[in-house]
Amino acid sequence: MTRGSIIDFILLAAIWGASFLFMRLGAVEFGALPTAAVRVAIASLFLLPLLWLRGLGPQLRQHWKPVFLIGVLNSGIPFACYSFALLSITTGMSAILNATVPLFGALIAWLWLKDRPTGSRVLGLAIGFAGVALLAWDKASFKPDASGVAPAWAVMACLFATLCYGLAASATKRYLSGVPPLATATGSQLGATLGLALPALWFWPTQMPSVQAWLSLVAVGVVCTGIAYVLYFRLIEQAGPARALAVTFVVPVFAVFYGVLFLDESVTGWMLLCGLVIVCGTALSTGLLKLPGRVAARTST
């Protein structure tokens, strides 16, 4: 990774860490689907003028079908899933589960793009998913809590979102390689907006949300989506999907910090232990962490 890519990587982690805080504040009053829809709609309004000023409209029109579909997969569905999950579980836990994105990304790249992993990367997949199972077991109850949402469904929603992210990363690399990041980011938000429009109108809250809730969605739309996705697609283009997805290693650090600071959320030792297992497994599965030669050779036989 170049120096510019490293800066983008850290900045993206800090921004996406804040997205869990803002989604939580918005979802409590808007609900899951309206929160996701408003987020991508605001991001679209922010990005469209930048797209036209850069003269990238023709590139978007040329690739609009795959871009729009990837937008639903990479933004619409995951944002709705996380908004739903944050009604029941903490921002820190949802961010730790979000760290499984590279696991799904590596698995999908193996099955779809034939990016065959080494023995140590296969071991990393096993370790990472074991960490997910341990963390999820702590929230395995399907009995609704005070929010009306069962914690187990919230965990499953987060994992389904990460699966969508992994699929979208490989699809972006395969079908949108060479497309300018701004065109991909703008088109993906437009596609997600169209996909969520009708469901969001159906579930729109009867009571007008507060100013704080609106400001939270403006922040998550402009900063955590509009600006963040330009950085994200630029990372995929410059460093590849595996390294771009590895940003989720760092996101939980920021998300936990923001949750403790602004929402008075508690962090348990079990969460931190499972998070460490997930991150170590993910680092191995993406090749960012490698076992010594002899150990790697044994795991591949």
Image (cartoon, rainbow, N blue to C red):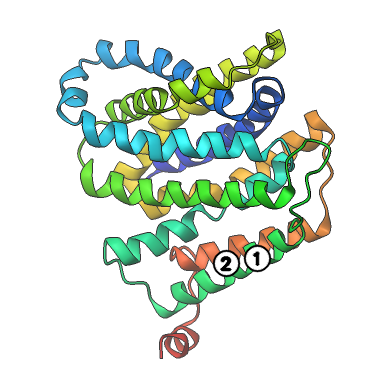
Location of residue 72 by image quarter:
top left
Q: Residue at 32% x, 71% y: name it.
A: 116
Q: Secondary structure at mark 2?
A: helix
> Residue 289: where, in percent of width, then height?
50, 67
How dense is the environment of label 2, judged by Cα within 10 Å: few (below 14), some, or many (20 and up)? some
Q: Secondary structure at mark 1?
A: helix
Q: Residue at 73% x, 43% y: name it.
A: 89
The disc label shown at residue 129, or none: 2
- Left or right: where 49 falls relative to 175: right
The disc label shown at residue 219, or none: none
- Left or right: where 8 falls relative to 85: left
| Amino acid on which the number 2 mark rests in the picture | Phe
- Left or right: where 278 falls relative to 286: right
Assess whether mark 2 and mark 1 are in contact (beta carbons under 8 angstroms). Answer: yes
Q: Residue at 69% x, 12% y: name it.
A: 209
Q: CA distance from mark 1 to mark 2?
A: 6 Å
Q: Residue at 56% x, 32% y: name it.
A: 15
> Residue 241: where, in percent of width, then height?
36, 50
- Number of numbered discs present? 2
Above-or-below relation of 250 to 15: below
Location of residue 56 by image quarter:
top left
Residue picked out by circle 1: 133
- The residue closer to the viewer here, 299 or 144, is 144
Above-or-below relation of 130 to 24: below
- Left or right: where 281 falls relative to 4: right
Query: Is residue 188 at least partly visible in the picture?
Result: yes
How dense is the environment of label 1, judged by Cα within 10 Å: few (below 14), some, or many (20 and up)? some
> Residue 40: where, in percent of width, then height?
46, 23
| Amino acid on which the number 1 mark rests in the picture | Ala
